[in-house]
Each structure stands twice: as C-alpha cells, then as structure tokens.
Amino acid sequence: MQYAVWFVRLVYAGWMIPAGLNHFYQLYPQPLGNQPISIAVFTALLDSGLFTVVKAVELVAGVMLLVGWRVPLALIMVLPVSFTVWYWDTELQGWWTASAIYGWAVVGCNVALLLAYWDNYRDFFTRHARPHLPWAGGAGDEGSAMEAQA
C-alpha cells in the first residue's frame, strides 16, 4: 500500500509542478477553455492576479509532495486548487468531455492522498479543542484569559 501512496504522490506532483511552473515559464500553451463560462472564469482569475497565487500554490505543493516534505500540509494547501480544477473541468467545460476526466483525476488524487494521510488530520476534528498559545505562559497555563473564555 505504501508504494501505491508513493505512486499517487508522484503522479499528483507530476501534474502540479509543470502546471504551476508553466505560468511563470511557459512550457506549453495554457488551455483557456472552450465554453464561454469557462473562458470568463479563466479570464477573471488571470485579470485579478489570483491565477498567479493558484499557480504558486500548485508549484510549491507539488515540490513538497515530490520530496515528501510536510505532505499533509501540502495536501491541505492544494485542496482548494484541486476542487477549482475539478469544477472548471467538469461543470464549466462539460461533464462529458475529456477535460472532465482530468478534473476527476486531479481531485481524486488529492482525496486519495488525504485519506492515506488521515491520521495526521484527526486533531482537526477534536470536539472541544483549546487554544495553546506559546506566548501566554505555555500550553497548560490555567490563568490565561483565552482558556477562561473557552
């Protein structure tokens, strides 16, 4: 199973690194879409500057996945990007297009890897989480104002 996770990580990084790098150094023509709504969304992302942020996140998270550094963090970082790619490829481009297959593959890799690293996310779902403020006297300080309010 470990080899399967490694393989999916490699495939996912193999998509993200060139996709992110392509925005800063053109490797291939950037697809603009073939539907009026997908072209409009792409243009809005590009004109607003948000596309540069998306591509930077893809590039950084892809490198993190490739080298195995902070993989759970990389998967959370890129989750909004993979959902956006899926939405653009399925809903905006068309559910029954070749683009939709790509969208499902991207979000599928992200979700499969999130499940593979699930143990790293368990604390996110703690029912009664308390803040631990390092500058407020340590983790177990009963006198902190934040803990009194919780």
Image (cartoon, rainbow, N blue to C red):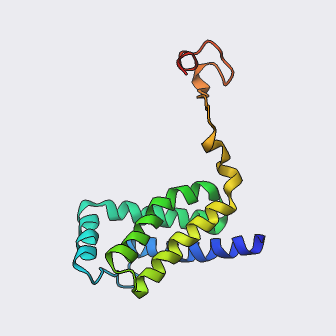
Q: Residue furthest top?
A: 143
Q: Tell me which residue sits at (67%, 55%) in the image.
A: 118
Q: Quadrant of residue 45?
A: bottom left
Residue 94 x/y as whole percent: 35, 81
* Figure disc tally: 0
Residue 78 x/y as whole percent: 50, 61
In this view, the residue in front, 82 or 127, is 127
Q: Which quadrant, please, contains the N terminus?
A: bottom right
In this view, the residue in front, 71 or 110, is 110
Q: Is residue 102 left or right of residue 63?
A: left
Q: Which quadrant, please, contains the C terminus?
A: top right
In this view, the residue in front, 3 or 96, is 96
Q: Is residue 116 left or right of residue 93?
A: right
In this view, the residue in front, 96 or 123, is 96
Residue 26 x/y as whole percent: 38, 79
Q: Quadrant of residue 98?
A: bottom left
Q: Tell me which residue sits at (51%, 56%) in the image.
A: 77
Above-or-below relation of 148 to 26: above
Above-or-below relation of 142 to 114: above
Q: Tell me which residue sits at (25%, 76%) in the image.
A: 39
Q: Tell me which residue sits at (56%, 15%) in the image.
A: 148
Residue 57 x/y as whole percent: 46, 61
Q: Residue furthest bottom?
A: 98
